[in-house]
Image: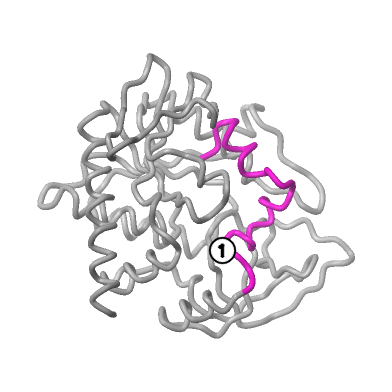
Amino acid sequence: MTHYIQSHLQTLEDESIYILREVVAQFQKPVLLFSGGKDSITLARLAQKAFYPAKIPFPFLHIDTGHNFPETIEFRDQLVKELGVELIVRYVQDSIDQKKVQEETGKYASRNALQTVTLLDAIEEFGFDACMGGARRDEEKSRAKERIFSVRDDFGQWDAKKQRPELFNILNGKIHFGENVRAFPISNWTEEDVWNYIAQEEIGLPSIYFAHKRKLVKRDGAFLAHSDYLNLVETDEIVESIVRFRTVGDMTCTAAFISEANTIPDIMYENKSSKSSERGARMDDKRSEAALEQRKKGGYF
């Protein structure tokens, strides 16, 4: 790794640690939203560094769709045990049982969008006033619009036109009763930065990020992990191949890449050569041109 990259990563790390400490300083009940993906795992390492030698002073919250990759859940449980942090899990299935949301049906059914109601209920249940997450501006255009501190109204909704300026990196965490803030400590990182940092810090990841043989469902040109959660149709083709996942989400909407990359340098080389974006493998983002922004307006992370 070159000196330039090391210096660049140090600058990013310093900024992220500053943001994490500002969240703890300005809010009463912060929480870290943890998905088990590489970005939230990186955020967990940064939180560990920000408050070392003390323990991380806030809990982790996972909204479990019930359709997660088992490798991710196993990794999540091991990591929180190592960090000694409190893990709060709330389940989409509970929201379905309470008839607050309705299970989708059909070929493209997914629980990804249903997470919003479960998340907003958890925020209200625990009184969280700041929810930190590993979203980055380079991921998707709606995420590029968000400030580091992104205010949600008392219904959990986001209005891109009512964001606060953050001149000179001054973060304004003042909110009214009922509002909360979504905070993005690695907002200015890129996918390449995250991979470089994971390599530098020797951070462990769920095995699905690396090439492995898997049973898949080929659908509309994409390869989805075969599972009981997918509603199969006649045109689906069951195949087996060596793949890896570039992003981690619900199994029903996260597609795999055909790949034999099983080291970080190989993954980074492959990503640079790819004609697909990181979120190009998220089938839920393809429902419409503004699919993620619409979900975010409703309270999605």
Residue at x 60% of width, y 75% of height: 274
Residue at x 27% of width, y 73% of height: 4
Residue 75 in the image: above or below residue 153: below
Indicate how the structure is coloured in the image. Answer: one colour
Q: Position of residue 96 (x, y in %)?
A: 64, 34
Callout 1 secondary element: helix
Residue at x 16% of width, y 47% of height: 51
Residue 9 in the image: above or below residue 93: below
Q: Position of residue 167 (x, y in %)?
A: 32, 36
Residue at x 46% of width, y 83% of height: 266
Residue 206 position by quadrant: bottom left
Left or right: where 212 falls relative to 80 = right
Image mark count: 1
Q: Is residue 33 magenta?
A: no
* Residue tagged 1: 278
Quadrant assignment for the N terminus: bottom left
Q: Position of residue 59 (x, y in %)?
A: 30, 40
Q: Which residues are magenta?
A: 275-301
